[in-house]
Amino acid sequence: MSNVSVIFLLGRLIVGTFLLFAGMDSLLHVEQHLHTTANGLNNPMLFMLTASAFLICGVIAISSASYAILSNLWALRK
């Protein structure tokens, strides 16, 4: 494995860990719902769960390098 591959792997792990903790933090702290309710949103729980799901899906996409694979396929198509 080349040095560049190791650096990209470490970068994906660092960013993935950050996004995972952000997603878990928004799932575990219910007091954030009070802030969204005060701003006038109708379904704060739905929006909080959706945001957490997007963060966790981002972790999966970054960790699996699916965007890199898809971009390589897009580049090879031309």
Image (tube, rainbow, N blue to C red):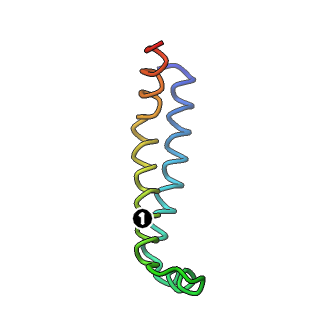
Q: Quadrant of residue 8?
A: top right
Q: Nearer the viewer, residue 78 or 4?
A: 78
Residue placed at 53% from the left, 85% from the top?
37
Q: Secondary structure at mark 1?
A: helix
- Residue corresponding to mark 1: 50
> Which residue appears at 44% of the width and 49% of the height?
59
Percent position of residue 39, x then y? 60, 82
Q: How many marks?
A: 1
**The one of 42 and 52 positioned closer to us in this rendering:** 42
- Position of 31 with respect to 46 (left or right) is right
Q: Residue at x 52, y 29 (%)?
A: 6
Name the kind of residue labelled 1 in the image: Thr
> Residue, x 52% and y 79% (percent of image)?
41
Q: Residue furthest right?
A: 39
In the rendered image of this protein, does residue 36 appear above or below residue 21? below
x%, y% of residue 48?
46, 71
Q: Quadrant of residue 47?
A: bottom left
Percent coordinates x, y for residue 20 in the rendering: 46, 57
Image position, residue 11 (x, y; %): 56, 39
Vertical placement of 69 versus 45: above or below?
Answer: above
Circle 1 residues within 10 Å: few <14, some 14–19, many ≥20: few
